[in-house]
Image (spheres, coloured by chain):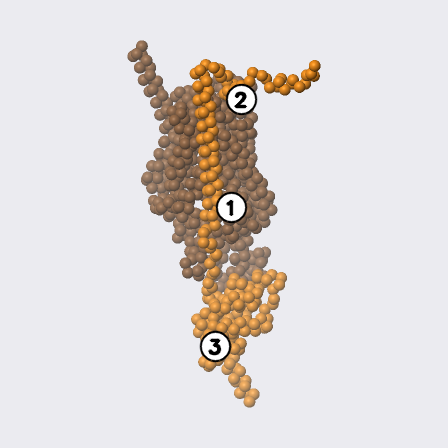
Chain colours: A brown, B orange
Amino acid sequence: MEKSRPLWDNPLQFVFACISYAVGLGNVWRFPYLCQMYGGGGFLIPYFIMLIIEGMPLLYLELAVGQRMRQGSIGAWKIISPYLCGVGIASIVVSFFLSMYYNVINAWAFWYLFHSFQDPLPWATCPLNSNHTGYEEECEKTSSTQYFWYRQTLNISPSLEASGSVQWEQALCLTLAWLVVYLCILRGTESTGKVVYVTASLPYCVLIVYLIRGLTLHGAVNGLVYMFTPKLEQLSNPKAWISAATQIFFSLGLGFGSLIAFASYNKPSNNCERHAIIVSLINSTTSVFASIVTFSIYGFKATFNYESCINKMILLLMNTFDLEEGSVTADNLSEMKGYLMATHPQEYAQLSPQLRNCSLEAELDTAVQGTGLAFIVYSEAIKNMEVPQLYSVLYFFMLLMLGIGSMLGNTAAILTPLTDSRAVAARFPKEVISGVVCLINCVIGLIFTMEAGNYWFDIFNDYAATLSLLLIVLVEAIAVCYIYGIRRFEKDLHTMIGRKPNWYWKIMWAFASPLLIISLFIFYLTDYILTGKLQYQAWDATQGQLVTMDYPGYALAVIGLLVVASTMCIPLGALLTFVRKRLKRESVSTTA
Amino acid sequence: MLRVLLLILSVVAVGHAELCKPDAQNAFKVRLSIKTALGDNAYAWDANEEYLFKAMVAFAMRRYSSKSATQISNVLLCNVTDRVSFWFVVTDSSKNMTAVPGSEVEAAIRMNRNRINSAFLLSEKTLQFLRITSTLSPPVEPSTPVWLIVFGVVLCLIVAGIIFLIVAGIQQRKKKNKESTERENLEEKGEVTVTVENGIPCEALDLKAGHVNGVFAADDERFTSL
């Protein structure tokens, strides 16, 4: 009796799983940054063009492969061609690297979530120094939110070399994060299918609440206007197009094997073409939606800081020159400055190092991405809202949902091939395999909870998945179109869905997407070669800001290892299969 | 007589002027931000408020050292500006109108800071004594950090969920194993052919293994009895 493959309860679970996986933290913390850097509203043009050229076709390709072959990544590519088993293994290696470091973000989200149940929020004020005469020195130099992130959350060391010890609080949060992931994947699609209803829909509820709250904040309009004024001259900057292509590529999570794994649990008659279009469109609109929210928050924070700066200057002038309260206001500040400079030149000159020109544009220009945006900028904005505890809990819960949704996809990419392979699945039940994978990842993940952990996190974040994924997806596209054959693929799709793909899909698969990926690949390689040294941002506690430092030798070795470990799997797999076939042929010929 | 009085007054005035001037040795600068603190309810700073201030400082000095007999007239104010800021100095009448040492004044003000603040409806930030550092109150910290409590609750819930799912899975597998061994025994005996539809054995659909179709059996009642 053949053991039937577990299936999703209904197609909606599959769509939700894909959305939950694709809509992740990148939509919230990377897209708004790119929008700001590359021309505001104008960035949407290259973004949607890239969606049509590479996003939808490649997503459809992966879903179709998974649904047709009904196996995880290793099995699926082996069926297409035995020489391509390396592609599946490379996907697993990349997924493994990703799951190692990605769950640390969920640990941080848990940390902030648990700390949101206090009044006042712990990142709202600086802690006092030891003799209670003033605030902590490091906190004075920087802001209270940055201090909370760098000192009380990460307890970051001044450089990568100073590893420090494991922070037990972060280790606890990481363990909790892995337990949550284990709970969700424990029973395979049975449990994952129910969890994705929550992880896919809850972030949208929170984003809507934040949209309403964000748009009603004082100064939100400044941020929105700043973002959406299209600076069309950025369109001529090639970096804008490359960033759009890269963002679409990584945002959809192609090449990890998660989409193949999810699609393999579909009924063969599932209409994956429609689902591919739906998922990619929802992913992109979520990015735009999230950036509207982010920019209204930016606007609020920038306006708040600008007004505090103005008030500080007013107070300074009033105190130095003993002017009546209310005589200097925001409107007449510049005139008063001129008047005072004329009437009391000496005292004004003494004061000038402390006087700053407060500028709203300068505040808005501080473009931040990544963990800085999510944990520093947002928490700074939240602490100034009314009922900050509520908004804080909502926000970090949303981050958690986004992160866990993506983790489910990653672990599915690793577990599906393992449970498919008869060697492993026959001996151990599903729960044990999932448990072992989670345990190994958790133990390795403790590296990221050390004092220098954030620097290692940045290494993994920047290098573990970038080049390898481009290569994997390129090989996938070429394999399906030219090795498997596009006519055979067409026939398969016709059997599954009931109609053949039209010319748009075929042209994209065969020419446009591979060409685009090759150009991205060449661009990244030349960029790495031209920049020469690789550098990172380290936190200097004495100055209270980030400084650029060079990576030490062993860190560069780790980076090289990360890239090589996954990319080399492809040729090695092909070579191994070739050698094995040769040996088999020889043994057959000798016995015959 | 009048001339003597005038002379004494001028001497006193000069003495006062020497004691109370900006950056004098034992003088302190005070700055009030009444409009910032009270907004529309702000009061104007006039001679009456100055009298109250002198009274508060005298009160603070008396409270600090019980032997001190500071009078309101011992507190001198000068250089009042529109900002509302001024300098003050406390004199000691027993020591021939010299200024009380700054350290004593500082300690006295520190001790009675919140009484002085509340007399003027102001706070530490809006009634500033420059050069007198204030002791900031540390934030209230509960014995167990709040985050650990929330962490513990969530951890217990998650672990309970995991254990529940694992146990349910083991029970399900045991049941399946029992059924499959039973079926294997029956198959060996050759008695029951197992028809499988969609991976579900047909006998699981109708456990009674009857040869009567239940639907038609129920229809007997529809036929009228003869």
B19 or A242, nearer to the observer = B19
- Element type at marker 1? helix
Q: Which residue is mark 3?
A: B68
Residue at 43% x, 20% y: name it. Answer: A79
A536 or A391, nearer to the observer = A391
Single out the residue that lies furthest toward the left: A590
Image side of residue A305 versus residue A84, left or right: right
Q: Quadrant of the C terminus of chain A?
A: top left
Label 2 and label 1: CA atoms lie apart by 60 Å
Q: Amino acid at mark 2?
A: Leu
Label 3 and label 2: CA atoms lie apart by 102 Å
Q: Are marks 2 and 1 in contact (CB under 8 Å)?
A: no
A7 or A22, nearer to the observer = A7
Q: Amino acid at mark 3?
A: Ser
Q: How many marks?
A: 3
Q: Which residue is mark 2?
A: B207
Above or below A227: residue A511 = above
Above or below B11: residue A484 = above
Q: Position of residue A291 (x, y in %)?
A: 54, 40
Q: Position of residue B133 (x, y in %)?
A: 46, 64
Residue at 56% x, 35% y: name it. Answer: A285
* Sequence-first disc among 3 and 2: 3
- Element type at marker 3? loop
Q: Which residue is mark 1?
A: A378
Q: Chain of mark 1?
A: A
Q: Amino acid at mark 1?
A: Tyr
* Crowdedness near tag 1: few (<14), some (14–19) or many (≥20) residues, C-alpha within 10 Å: some
* Crowdedness near tag 3: few (<14), some (14–19) or many (≥20) residues, C-alpha within 10 Å: some
| Disc 3 versus disc 1: nearer the observer | 3
Q: Are marks 3 and 1 in contact (CB under 8 Å)?
A: no
